[in-house]
Amino acid sequence: MKAHPVQLTLPMAFHIFGGSLIEKKLGKADLPNRRIAETWEVSDVDGMNASVKNGALAGKTLRELTLSEPDALVAPGWRGPQFPLLTKFIDGSGMLPVHLHANDDAAQRLEQQPNGKTEAWHILWAAPGATCLAGIKPGISRERIREALLAEEYDSIMQRLPVNAGDTFYIPGGMLHSFGPDTLIYEIEQTSNIQQHAMPWRMEDGSKISPAEREKNIDALMQQLRPELQVEPQPGLLLEESEALTRRLLCAGPYFALERTSFTERYHYAFNSVRIVSNLGAPLHIEMGDERWPLDRAATCVLPASLGEITFSGEGELLIGYLPDLQHEVIAPLEAQGYDRQAISRLGDVWDEKR
């Protein structure tokens, strides 16, 4: 594979909770003139598969590259049925459905899917007073949870948490959640589109769901619910800081890690597994020897593992997602910065087995 920074086609979702925040707040270009709920920045989900649109790999789907060149694209020795990471910008101009995604075990047992969906939200913008619903209040029985969902009494059973720009929420599979209105996020997650939601309407168009179908949906949700899970917004932990560079680790677990990196001069970046880079700042370039590849404002690219190193030119503000080696890329660097186990644990499932 002739590796280069990969830019992908952009699947989108036009659900009723969307608006125009992705264009207005991020400055993302070339979007259709309609309500947009989600731009799927990197996607290998069936029905929302992305294809390469630049360079020598143009025309190949992300799935084709993943299956034919897993060592070069993802990481040496990695194998899987699909590209492992899904990333999105999500416009929560309206309230998202109260819903959950199965964890790996439930996805395999109940959905006949290879994996579930743990995710994390990094808050890019939120109106004053914005909140989210995430997790179940302690001590509430399953019977009461089901009753409240049927009655749309979400606040009676769920934790309502403040949402502020710069915070990150790590949401394991099985956690009930929702956010919006007036919220814009970047989401990184396992590649999956399975979900169960509790609402009396369809998120695609707002059409009503019959009482019988809704009760069936809630019963399916209850089979996958893990009410013991809790979350708190986190500001992230500094990995590295100097006059010219700041790296902040926002979340980490067995499925993904996410960093926010800012720099004021050329930034040489080395890596040994695939990186997903989303540009939150002004347009910049990625340099590889004599080659230069543009990365526009609010654009995303995939850096194949085999590249190994690149240079970002100019000033930048990036989100960088990847499959972490938890011990060497998360735990050891943070311990070297003086963080203890408790602080590191707040980032996600850093020490836990895959859920």
Image: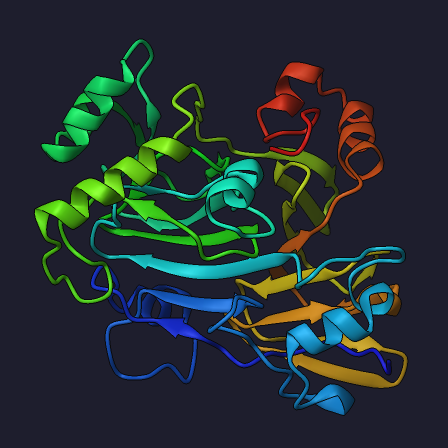
Q: Position of residue 255 (x, y in %)?
A: 65, 44
* Residue found at x 24% / y 51%: 182
Residue 229 to residue 322: above or below: above
Q: Position of residue 139 (x, y in %)?
A: 31, 9
* Residue found at x 71% / y 16%: 340
The answer, for residue 128, to whether it is visible in the render is no
**Quadrant housing residue 253:** top right
Q: Which quarter of the figure is the N terminus placed in? A: bottom right
* Residue found at x 55% / y 67%: 43
State the scheme by which the image is colored: rainbow
Q: Position of residue 266 (x, y in %)?
A: 77, 65
Q: Which of 227 and 209 is in front in this view?
A: 209
The answer, for residue 208, to whether it is visible in the render is yes
Q: Nearer the viewer, residue 112 or 148?
A: 112
Q: Which quarter of the figure is the C terminus placed in? A: top right
Residue 186 to residue 107: above or below: below
Q: Position of residue 154 (x, y in %)?
A: 18, 31
Q: Judge from the rendering whether residue 34 lies leftward or rightward of residue 22; answer left or right.
A: left
* Residue found at x 87% / y 68%: 306
Q: Nearer the viewer, residue 78 or 347?
A: 78
Q: Judge from the rendering whether residue 54 lies leftward or rightward of residue 107; answer left or right.
A: right
**Quadrant housing residue 28:** bottom left
Q: Judge from the rendering whether residue 85 lies leftward or rightward of residue 4; answer left or right.
A: left
Residue 10 to residue 171: above or below: below
Total numbered labels: 0
**Quadrant housing residue 73:** bottom right
Which residue extends farthest top? 139
